[in-house]
Amino acid sequence: MLTRVPKADIRKGMFVEAVECSAAAFGKRRFLLNSHQDYLAIQESPADFVVINTTYGTEAAPHSGQRPLTRAEKRAEAAATLTRSIKALKTELITVVVGGKLNLESLSKVVEEIGQADSETTSLFYDLTRFRQKDEALFQHSLAVGILMGKLGTALELDTDTVALLVLSGLLHDVGKLTLSKNILQKQTPLTAVERKLLRSHPQRGHHLLKRHVIVPDEVLDVCLHHHEALDGSGYPSGKSASEISQMVRIATVCDAFDKLTTARPGKSDRGVAEAIAWMFARDHQFDRKLVLRLGAIIDD
Ligand SMILES: [Fe+2]
């Protein structure tokens, strides 16, 4: 749980999420406070309060005047996390596309923040991705799918390593789209047959890019290549049948479609949560109904 404490009340053993001042004044974030040097640096900073996470460190003393974060403060925290996450995601996705070395370390911070956050925080975090700018749409969609996949995995009581893989898969699933021109991605009129063929090649393009990095787990490659498969074999690129589609891919398919359905796009208005869930539930030839229902229950929470 995130708690805001006066800086005078911090002590070793607390897990510091953020010190409430500019990064220039105190830039270190998310660390276990165990050095006197860090303690002094916080005391000398212009901040009045420090946000600690009691899930990872000791709690503040009861007399410290601590109070849980207000919704507005939590929202501000989530917005800061979102900004950091998009920046990291953008850097890494672009690195993959231009043939650079993928740094999973930087993405693992995003995975960790999403995978270990409590459900209220992930809900806030997900809400914030809805305020997307057009040119940021792909990055925000990737982030939203990562968050949804993590939430669904947690609701399904999958272990933390699997939840982390789900989040990472969501973040990377559409990387192949970055190899396509903006004219195709943002086209407001119907695509030509050639353009549609190009667009539908993004799973293979992404898979090809990610495969070159030995550090990318097989599950992430599986999701990237198969997130447009359908249970009845009508999907692409492989036309896989239900028995050949892994649970991780099924989770990705449901979360990917849900985020697209509930997000306004050029020429298409967004649907409400209930409408999107009903639309997907009616298409059990395409989506796993159990996962659709579970997703609906989480978002309705
Ligand atoms: Fe996709």
Image (spheres, rainbow, N blue to C red):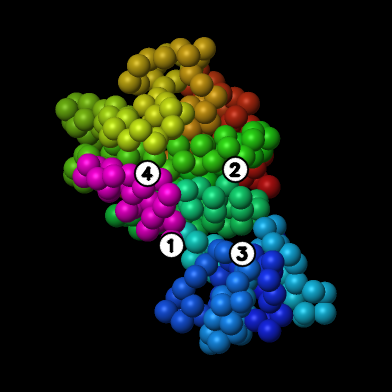
Of all residues, the one furthest to the front in this rendering is 36
Q: Could you tell me how far apart the alpha carbons at marks 4 and 1 are, in whole angstroms?
A: 26 Å
Q: Earlier in the sequence, mark 3 or mark 4?
A: 3
Q: Residue at x 27, y 48 (%)?
A: 94
Dot 4 falls on a residue whose secondary structure is: loop
Q: Which mark is residue 32?
A: 3
Mark 2 or mark 4, whichever is nearer to me: 2
Q: Earlier in the sequence, mark 1 or mark 3?
A: 3
Q: Earlier in the sequence, mark 4 or mark 1?
A: 1
Q: Is residue 133 above or below residue 297?
A: below
Q: Which residue is mark 1?
A: 83
Q: Which residue is mark 2?
A: 151
Instruction: Give 274 or 297, whichever is nearer the viewer.
Output: 297
Please tell me whether residue 282 belongs to the stretch shown in magenta. no
Q: Could you tell me how far apart the alpha carbons at marks 1 and 3 are, in whole angstroms?
A: 22 Å
Q: Is residue 273 above or below residue 157?
A: below
Dot 2 falls on a residue whose secondary structure is: helix
Mark 3 or mark 2, whichever is nearer to me: 3
Q: Residue at x 79, y 74 (%)?
A: 61
Tag 2–tag 4 contact (CB < 8 Å): no
Identity, as a three-letter code, of the amino acid under mark 2: Lys
Identity, as a three-letter code, of the amino acid under mark 4: Lys
